[in-house]
Image (spheres, rainbow, N blue to C red):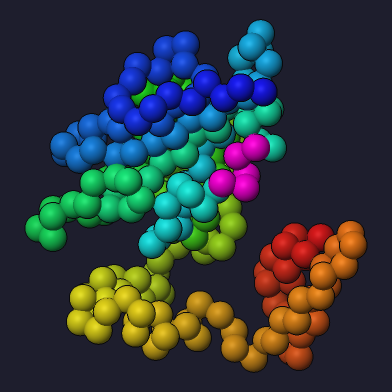
Amino acid sequence: MISRRQPPGKFSCQGQKQMNGTFSTADGLQLAYYVDDFTDAWRKPDTVLLLHAAMGSSRRWFQWVPPLSRRYRVVRLDLRGHGNSQIPKPTDDFSLSLLVSDALALLDLVGADRAHVVGNSAGGYVSQQLAINYPNRVKSLALFGSTPGLKNSHAPTWIPKIKEIGLKQFLADTIDERFDLRLILTWSSGSSNRRVRMTQPLSPALSFTCARTTS
């Protein structure tokens, strides 16, 4: 199969099957996006919007793209300040509502009235707000590694701390906030599956995550 991916640049999405480019947000930032669609040419597929985690980028979805793009039009966004998207100035506003407006602007750009929205971690927060406030734009919602909200989160302190001690030291100091260090996961590669062995019982939520990961 020959990919019809276009070179980087700004494009109109009408009639395009594969592309990567940028678009301008309401407050003037340039955000990068990517569209992959290897569905049959005579079909009009549903759109899947993939929103990545904080300190990540759309590249995290690479392994998802081949199987999904055969059935759906797959749209990925580099959230503002991530990947190939423009970094806001320290004095610029940065809020969840802005991230939601960015996602809406991208759906408008690619001509998707509704989309299956998939969010990982911080991308899940954006996805939830998109579904809550604009339910007519969300055909289905899938979340993983994402809590229902940030009420008890330390996230607002992360950026100042990273500026103070650097990203590497921050990650080392806070790793126990993201992973349960009582768990020892031992992976053994088999011909058809992988097994997880642990020293402590898992919570139901984590059990579900591991089951999905290792199946």
Q: Is residue 48 left or right of residue 52?
A: right
Q: Is residue 213 visible?
A: yes
- The quadrant of the picture occupied by the N terminus is top right
Q: Position of residue 118 (x, y in %)?
A: 55, 45
Furthest residue in direction left, as rendered: 91
Give the overall secondary structure of the magenta segment. helix
Q: Foreground: 192 or 71?
A: 192
- Name the residue rendered at 45%, 62% in the picture: 149
Q: Quadrant of the C terminus?
A: bottom right
In the rendered structure, which segment of residues is drawn in magenta? 62-66
Quarter of the figure with residue 45:
top right
Question: How far across and how far down the image is residue 101, in percent?
Answer: 31, 38
Up the image or down, 82 lies above or below 183; here it is above
| Residue 201 seen | no
| Image point (70%, 77%), residue name | 203
In the image as oriented, which residue stretches furthest toward the top? 42
Q: Residue at x 16, y 37 (%)?
A: 28
Instruction: Classify residue 210 as left or right of residue 180.
Output: right
Seen in the picture, residue 188 relative to 3 is either above or below; the reply is: below
| Magenta span contains residue 60 | no
* Left or right of residue 108, residue 25 in this image: left
Q: Residue 11, image x and y in percent? A: 33, 20
The quarter of the displayed image where residue 69 is located: top right
| Residue ranking furthest to the right | 191
In this view, the residue in front, 198 or 140, is 198
- The x and y percentages for residue 126 are 42, 49
The answer to whether 181 appears left or right of 194 in the picture is left
As for residue 65 lying within the magenta part, the answer is yes
Number of numbered discs overlaid on the protein picture: 0
Q: Residue at x 30, y 32 (%)?
A: 22
Residue nearest the observer in this picture, 4 or 67: 4
